[in-house]
Image (cartoon, coloured by chain):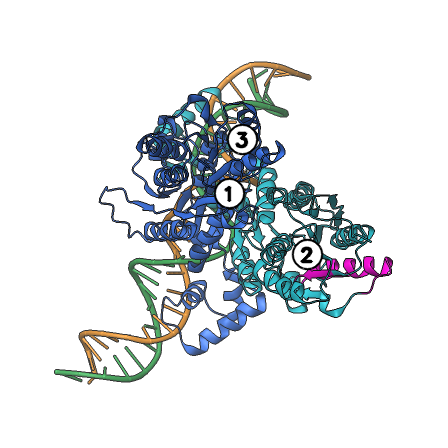
Chain colours: A blue, B cyan, C orange, D green
Amino acid sequence: MATIRDVARHAGVSISTVSLALNGTGPVSEETRARIDAAVAAVRYTPNLMAQNLKRGQSKLIGMVLGDAANPFFGRLFGTIDKHISGHEHMLIVANLASDPGRELRTLTLLKRHRVAGIIMTPLRNDPEFAAHLNELDVPVVLVDQDVDGTALDFVTSDHRRGAEMLTAYLARLGHRRIAYVGGQRNMWAAERRLEGFRSAMAEGGLAVEPEFEIVADYSADLAYDNVIRLMSSPSRPTAILAANNYMAIGALQAVTDLGFRCPDDVSIAGIDVVAWSSIVMPRITTVEQPIDELARVASLWMMEHVRGEAGRGGERRCHVAEPRLVIGHSCAPLPK
Amino acid sequence: MATIRDVARHAGVSISTVSLALNGTGPVSEETRARIDAAVAAVRYTPNLMAQNLKRGQSKLIGMVLGDAANPFFGRLFGTIDKHISGHEHMLIVANLASDPGRELRTLTLLKRHRVAGIIMTPLRNDPEFAAHLNELDVPVVLVDQDVDGTALDFVTSDHRRGAEMLTAYLARLGHRRIAYVGGQRNMWAAERRLEGFRSAMAEGGLAVEPEFEIVADYSADLAYDNVIRLMSSPSRPTAILAANNYMAIGALQAVTDLGFRCPDDVSIAGIDVVAWSSIVMPRITTVEQPIDELARVASLWMMEHVRGEAGRGGERRCHVAEPRLVIGHSCAPLPK
DNA sequence: CGATCCTATCGAAACGGTTCGATATCAATG
DNA sequence: CATTGATATCGAACCGTTTCGATAGGATCG
């Protein structure tokens, strides 16, 4: 592959002149510039970014760590962030955790080896060991969606607690009293906030939460399916189900359908974060939507500020909490008196 | 950030010895190795991959170009390819075309600047200019899903034509004669194959294709929706609709539902490539599924062969055509006599 | 006209590694 | 004991760039 040396030789000038001309970083005569341009075309020269970055001491690569690439939420998040980032001749180097928290540390190390200029990540773990690693990483990090306690990293999220509250309160307003909650892993940050929101809205509405109505289904459609089958087979079944993410909402809907119940006539179902793409599910599921575009925009912006060294290292961590949006579908009905 | 020089100084040995020890590429005494390990930990040394790659003349980065990151098909494709690739201490640098063919050339150039070891891409364009660029790129490329005529690049796809045939024949077997086809852009490779499959199966079944029943909706749910609304409002409406991708199938389903028709009682709907994630749509849409895992596996394998220089440069291009799988749902019904 | 200042160009020293060809030590061999 | 062959270590060249300081030839100025 052609190097800058080939261009210099072909144009009959020195290497430094070529560099000066190509980067527009020094005075070059009109005639020389033309000869260099011709030479570039002739030898098919493409600057080697690895060499440039090495010399400049900074790379144009930004790491992005996704919790689960197969989930459309992360797909849209990535797509939107990419749109913002790649405008600045930067590129994203993306890693997929496939919902496996065990890959998180290894991935971060690998990204650091690549000397990425920064990392945007949706973390899975939330424990002191992980926080310590993040703090010692020495690379700008913007967390998205989930927080890691004990770090001072920029953080962009939507108000998970409020979202769960909105849906729970909505179900309560429809007259439901026996509301089941299908939630994610207990140690995950967002899952905890959502659970808090559910409980708080239940308490607010003067409703009791029966222990067996608080289910942990690890954000998995299959687990949600099994649990809802069990729940709905009991004589003391709920009249409404709130699922904490898109997969579990769909698992729940499938379960009640397979049992012969109709939604919303026999049971109401609402789900957090059932993104637009799946909202075509019939009946359309009532949901709170995260403003993915807003999350992506703020995360990209802050990351670019870090990259340009403009991030006010005032020590203060920045947090942006976006408001979720209640989208009423056809999956919830008022409870007959 | 600590360099190999710091490690050497701290351990009291030469730089080359550190390199030899760390890479296990030369004999190093047990004692020295221990001192070096200690020094690495002490100065928090992380090898600079950019420098390593520059020296070794090859990078551990593989480019991946996605047609549309928000589409779960690409999300799952990426996730699975990442699983295979990232095992070999390689990483993916991913770019999203967001369905905009205009970004394709710029993206490839940028990836080449980064000196990626290879590129896995799902192309959008299929024209001579683009083919010429690909041929002159001088980087190993594996095409996935769509072909580019006039190149000799490895190509992994599923049998789009056969998939469309299977669904069309299935509808015909149910007794449908007035079948409408909602297809993608006319110049895209896969869209053409699917259209061929539809036409061939129609001819095979002795069915005539009315021109107004062959719709071009650019893989967009909205366009499909509008067109199906128009189609179904006509007195000579079809009894079955075949949509060429997941988005359009959902748009079509939404349209017939909004018009007050029931599916499958009033009209049957089938869709190509309605991935598992959306198969929960009620009624579950009959579809042909692409074996994403198989595509990802073969593409990753071939790419790693290229990277290791094992690719038999016999000049012969390799093609892998996977068989799509017919998944019967509840969206199609026999036509009453 | 000599000093001064642009303008255009160049050589050489980095950046952080790898790797090849020394060199030095030491045990085994004939 | 001189030779050989491992074994362990090192110095220096190099990968493809950028960038700093130097040089040289005008044009401008007092």
Secondary structure under the numbered disc 2 in the rendered image: loop
Q: Which residue is mark 1?
A: A331
Q: Amino acid at mark 1?
A: Ser
Chain identifier of the residue bearing label 2 in the image = B
Task: Calculate the distance from the C-alpha at mark 3 to the C-alpha at mark 1.
Answer: 17 Å
Q: Quadrant of the C terminus of chain A?
A: top left
When asked about the image quadrant of residue B249, the answer is bottom right
Q: Quadrant of the N terminus of chain A?
A: bottom right
Chain identifier of the residue bearing label 3 in the image = A
Q: Which residue is mark 3?
A: A224
Q: Nearer the viewer, residue C25 or B186?
A: B186
Above or below — where is A31 with respect to A75?
below
Mark 3 or 1, closer to the camera: 1
Secondary structure under the numbered disc 3 in the rendered image: helix
Give the image location of residue B197, x and y in percent: 78, 57
Q: Which residues are magenta?
A: B180-208
Which residue is pictured at 60% across the width and 54% down the height? B257
Which residue is pictured at 30% across the width and 51% down the height? A309
Q: Amino acid at mark 3?
A: Ala
When asked about the image quadrant of residue A109, the answer is top left
Is A99 positioned to the left or the right of B178 in the image? left
Mark 3 or 2, closer to the camera: 3
Q: Which residue is mark 2?
A: B244
Can residue B16 be seen in this snapshot?
no
Whether label 3 touches label 2, CB < 8 Å: no
